[in-house]
Amino acid sequence: MDKIRNNKFATTISVIVAAVFIANLVLSRGFNLLMISLTGGGRLVDFLAASRSDLINIPQCYRLITYGYLHPTIWHLAINICALWYVGLFIEKELSKKLIFFIYHVGLIVPCIVFLLICPNDYMYGASPAIFCFLGIMVMWLIKDRTIFSEYKSLRGSRYLLCYMILSNFLSLGTFVVHLAGFCTGLFIGLIVRRGSR
């Protein structure tokens, strides 16, 4: 229970993304729900995912944020919830909830813009750009203060986060681009924001 209390932001985001996943299945019940949950798709993708045409032609700027709460596949949802949880265990000790909320959304918006400039025909969904933004902050803090390496090593889920950082970039070129953009955004934020900024 203490972990949930100390990881409130990650818990809140996890509940929201799980609710959006379930809502996508409920709204898509006329289709094969097993296939949707394993391979993606569903009605909410049409309304929440980010694409260049939705942002420029329509324009629906809210999608710069809503895509980060949409995970059409169960494996994508589970992997990102675990990563968010483990990142939160460290980040939420160091930053205020308001600052974490702000950084999370900057970590969605900036990588989305970069991604859609480089990959104009693709679309985006998932919280991983914001998670990579937090990972970038953690790396920048490590560069500035090597003594926290042992703290990172003892952090619950540190191996999971290392595998997440490496393996998730082999999914596609677009995934690599958006993760790199999120990570670089985090590096920059980590230069400005100090540990313990509560």
Image (cartoon, rainbow, N blue to C red):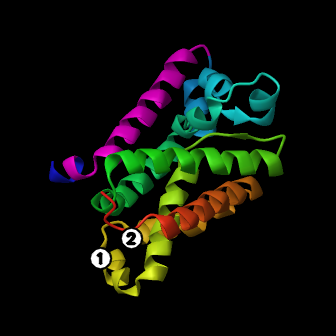
The reply to whether dot 2 and dot 1 touch (C-beta < 8 Å) is yes
Q: Is residue 116 above or below residue 170?
A: above
Residue 33 in sight in this render: yes
Q: Which residue is mark 2?
A: 158
Taking the image as shown, residue 17 lies to the left or right of residue 186, namely left
How far apart are the two marked residues, 2 and 1, measured between alpha carbons? 7 Å
Residue 11 falls within the magenta-colored stretch = yes
Q: For the residue labelled by badge 1, is the local secondary structure a helix, a strand or a loop?
A: helix
Q: Residue 73, located in which quarter of the rendered image? A: top right
Q: For the residue labelled by badge 2, is the local secondary structure a helix, a strand or a loop?
A: helix
Q: Please, what is the three-letter code of the amino acid marked with disc 2?
A: Ser
Residue found at x 62% / y 44%: 109
Q: Residue furthest left?
A: 1
Residue found at x 36% / y 53%: 85
Q: Please, what is the three-letter code of the amino acid marked with disc 1?
A: Ser
Q: Which residues are magenta?
A: 5-30
Residue 132 falls within the magenta-colored stretch = no
Tell me how many marks there are. Answer: 2
Residue 55 in percent (x, y) is at 74, 31
Q: Residue 61, located in which quarter of the rendered image? A: top right
